[in-house]
Image: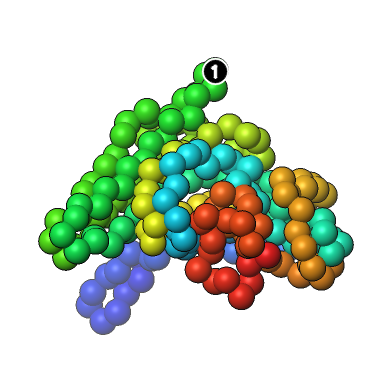
């Protein structure tokens, strides 16, 4: 007991400092994920009506790096769809309709097969925001393939926002489906959502100065 005047206080007992030289040196900590991951929203504007499928290869071909003037590789190895948004302006005196489906279909994992649709009214555009169902094909990371990620049925001048998560695998070289024209080796380019070159795409990226 410690005494201070006429009062007694219990002696505080703290932890004893560790003896020097008795602690082991830990091994270096484990590294976090070292793959390159990238979440982004790509925006496209249809220059004509479109009714067709967008594949996982198309989504990976949206971001390219040229290796020669006519050959380009995908920057990323796999992709996952987080969300799709559509806006279609109404035509005066007419109704404008947009529709989409996550209708992928492979053994084991499929899309939710639901049809999402909206129609304009007055001056308000047709608008959709769609998220793939949990544990469906589009909601999981997919490598480049001709498998359908989703289907679009849209008129001309539809704005399409595609929210994606990309992941890179070191030393992967996945060539783009279609050749490029006039590329500069080492330069990163954009491509239309349908995977077709700038001159022929129906769904060009709004950043046309960087599209090839």
> In this orientation, does residue 34 appear?
no
Q: Quadrant of residue 146?
A: top right
Considering every residue shown, the one lying at the far left of the view is 122
Could you say where residue 102 lies in the image, as x and y percent from the top left?
41, 35
Q: Extreme bottom residue here?
A: 5
The residue sitting at 82% across, 56% down in the picture is 71
**Residue sitting nearer the eye, 11 or 86:** 86
Helix, strand or loop status at disc 1: loop
Question: Which residue is identified by label 1?
Answer: 107
* Relative to 111, residue 3 above or below: below
**Foreground pick, 200 / 99:** 200
Q: Residue at x 63, y 43 (%)?
A: 57
Which of the image's four quarters has the C terminus? bottom right
Number of numbered discs on residues: 1
Q: Residue at x 26, y 81 (%)?
A: 5
Q: Residue furthest front?
A: 93
Toward the viewer: 129 or 182?
182
- Give above or below for 108 relative to 146: above
| Whether residue 97 can be seen here | yes
Residue at image location 39% in from the left, 61% down from the top: 157
- The quadrant of the rendering that contains the N terminus is bottom left
Is 183 placed left or right of 118 in the picture? right
Q: Looking at the image, which residue sits at the far right?
A: 68
């Amino acid at each position: 007991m410690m005494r201070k005047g006429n009062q007694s206080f219990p002696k505080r007992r703290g932890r004893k400092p560790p003896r020097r030289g008795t602690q082991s040196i830990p091994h270096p900590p484990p590294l976090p994920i070292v793959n390159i991951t990238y979440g982004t929203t790509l925006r496209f504007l249809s220059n004509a009506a479109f009714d067709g499928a967008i594949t996982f290869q198309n989504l990976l071909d949206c971001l390219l790096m040229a290796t020669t003037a006519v050959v380009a590789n995908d920057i990323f190895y796999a992709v996952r769809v987080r969300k799709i948004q559509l806006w279609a302006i109404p035509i005066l005196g007419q109704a404008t309709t947009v529709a989409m489906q996550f209708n992928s279909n492979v053994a084991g994992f499929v899309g939710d097969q639901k049809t999402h649709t909206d129609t304009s009214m007055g001056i308000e555009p047709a608008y959709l925001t769609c998220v793939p169902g949990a544990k469906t094909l589009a909601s999981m990371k997919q490598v480049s393939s001709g498998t359908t990620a989703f289907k679009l049925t849209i008129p001309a001048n539809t704005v399409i926002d595609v929210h994606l998560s990309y992941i890179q695998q070191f030393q992967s070289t996945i060539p783009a489906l279609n050749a490029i024209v006039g590329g500069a080796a080492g330069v990163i380019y954009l491509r239309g959502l349908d995977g077709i070159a700038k001159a022929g795409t129906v769904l060009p990226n709004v950043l046309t100065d960087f599209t090839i």
